[in-house]
Image (spheres, grey):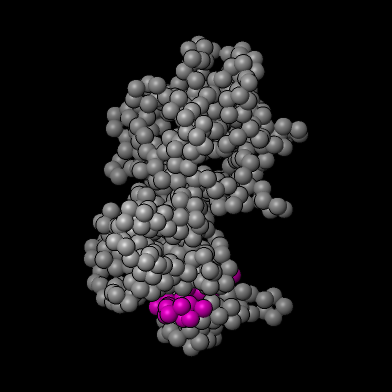
Amino acid sequence: MRYIFISGGVVSGLGKGITAASIGLLLKTKGFRVTNVKIDMYLNVDAGTIRPQEHGEVFVTQDGLETDQDLGNYERFIHESLHRDNYLTTGQVYKAVIDRERAFGYGGEDVEAIPHVTDEIISRLKKAGQTNHADIVIVELGGTVGEYQNAIFFEASRILHLRKPNQVLHIHVTHLPYLKNIGELKSKPAQQSSHFLNAMGIQADFIVARAETPIDEKRREKLAVFCNLKSEDIISAPDLPNIYQVPLYLNKQHFAEKIIKKLRLKPKGKLLGLKSWEEFSNNIDHPTKTVEIAMIGKYFQTGDYKLSDSYISVIEALHHAGSFHKTKVNITWINSSDLETSPANLTRFDGIIVPQGWGSRGTEGKINAVEISRKKSIPYLGLCFGMQMAVIEFARHEAKLSGANSAEADPNTPHQVIHIMPDQVEYLKKKQYGGTIRLGSWPCVLKPDTLLESLYQEYGRGKNTPWNLTRNLVQERHRHRYEVNNEYRKQLEVAGLIISGTSPDRQLVEAIELKDHPFFIGTQFHPEYISRPLNPHPIFLGFIKACLKKHRLQ
């Protein structure tokens, strides 16, 4: 098994995750089984209790771990479902070491950062490779080089390289800023971050030079000299129109071949090809149609800035479906709290999405958006919390359950059409919030002759699809603590709500829809988690198709 460590320098947000995912894709085109691991330096055991504005989207693996959003990018690029072993945090590692020490697992030794913590890290990386049957483990080191809190992971990579010198590579992703007043890229920050790495006893095998534009030969040579590398080991990575072009751009520089050579490996038969990937990326860049989508959320406002990372899987699922339909998907971000006081003109949009969320803030704004969508025949997609908001709106205005709400938003509502799942009550009483909600992949039974079932039948067939359609059963990923209250199911159905997906025992409502509407679907699960570039999710494909139809009618 080989290991590739990917670190970052100068600033965060350069695209280490996309670089790691792209390398994974390229190595698969050479026939190698790969797996990607993300290391976060936080003391959190997982990402489940971190605010989305702080850390971006929480991505859930099929086996139910709440992780960093980079795992979503990994899955989308290498077209594989990853596991809890693919995500490490400082909290996980320290907790394991301390628990072992308390159980006398170290036999009375002084427990120290080196070797005990570093050995725990290395053993977890090996396990990730074994779990995924990987030839190559690609490890993204969170943060930037030189930070105090991630140093122990760099040290683990150094020790692993010392033990297995021909089986470990280090790739450093660093920034070359473009100074407009001078009119050139400056390489000094990249040099300094490389020197930080050297000071830790690590020599990068490659430098990925992130910049607004491709690096020129002069900058390449300067980096090579001052960072102790050959010129051909400096890889240019400029800003590109979309992230799916990154592996194609790296491939033109024969990056995979260079990595394989340094790892002393020989190419095998292809596990993935790039032709379909090129077509997919080309459709994103050269659409023939356009739709306008309103995204009604509350986790994108941070200070004076609006960030989309909280909903990144939804955005990418829309791009996947858009590429399939050769359609550009324009997204307008609307804060749900604003809809409570000054409703926006949502009728100008071709579709409305209410994505995931928690708590009471902004719920009435989301319910208002659902009502407009339902009454004005605007295609609607409700995801998790968005499905719950749709049930509440329908209960109030069609089932005549005045004041209906979710127990989460209003514990005193006279009609708890959305209530806490029974097994969750004790967790909340004991304040056991982390990792206790309904997580991971669960089966959903599709109701025959519904829009939901027709979408999976039309778009969801084929081998190796993440949802694994088998007759009328699919596998979808979840992350929720509240569900539709079964006491109200009959009333809602009599009023016209269609329950189009349930758990196999029919105890949990997994999806709802409406008749006589262009497209109105809500899912308790998160279809966006398993949408992939070469396998767009059926629900998003159907949604974009409906949006296109509305756009043509306007």
**Residue 246 makes an appearance in the image:** no
The reply, left or right, for residue 316 in relation to residue 111 is right
Q: Which residue of the protein is positioned furthest toward the front in this rendering?
A: 108
Q: What residue lies at 49% left-to-right and 23% top-to-bottom?
A: 484
Q: Position of residue 456 (x, y in %)?
A: 38, 33
Establish if 107 lies above or below 296: below
Picture residue at 49% right of the left edge, 52% below the top: 44
Find residue 508 and report its horizontal and vertical position in percent: 42, 24
- Which residue is found at the position 47% from the left and 30% from the top? 426
Question: Does 36 lie within the magenta span?
Answer: no
Camera-nearest residue between 319 and 475:
475
Q: Position of residue 282 (x, y in %)?
A: 47, 56
Q: Quadrant of residue 87?
A: bottom left
The answer to whether residue 311 is left or right of residue 162 is right
What is the quadrant of the N terminus in the image? bottom left
On screen, residue 517 above or below 255: above
Q: How many marks?
A: 0
Q: Quadrant of residue 268?
A: bottom left
Q: Nearer the viewer, residue 48 or 74?
A: 48
Q: Residue furthest right?
A: 342
Magenta part of the protein: which range?
196-215
Question: Residue drawn at (29%, 68%), measured in percent from left and top?
Answer: 2
Quadrant (top left, top right, bottom left, bottom right) of the C terminus: top right
Q: Nearer the viewer, residue 271 or 274?
A: 271
User: Hey, which residue is sitting farthest bottom in the picture?
Assistant: 225
Asked whether 13 or 548 is in front, the reply is: 13
Instruction: Where is residue 188? Give x, y as percent.
Output: 59, 82
* Residue 484 makes an appearance in the image: yes
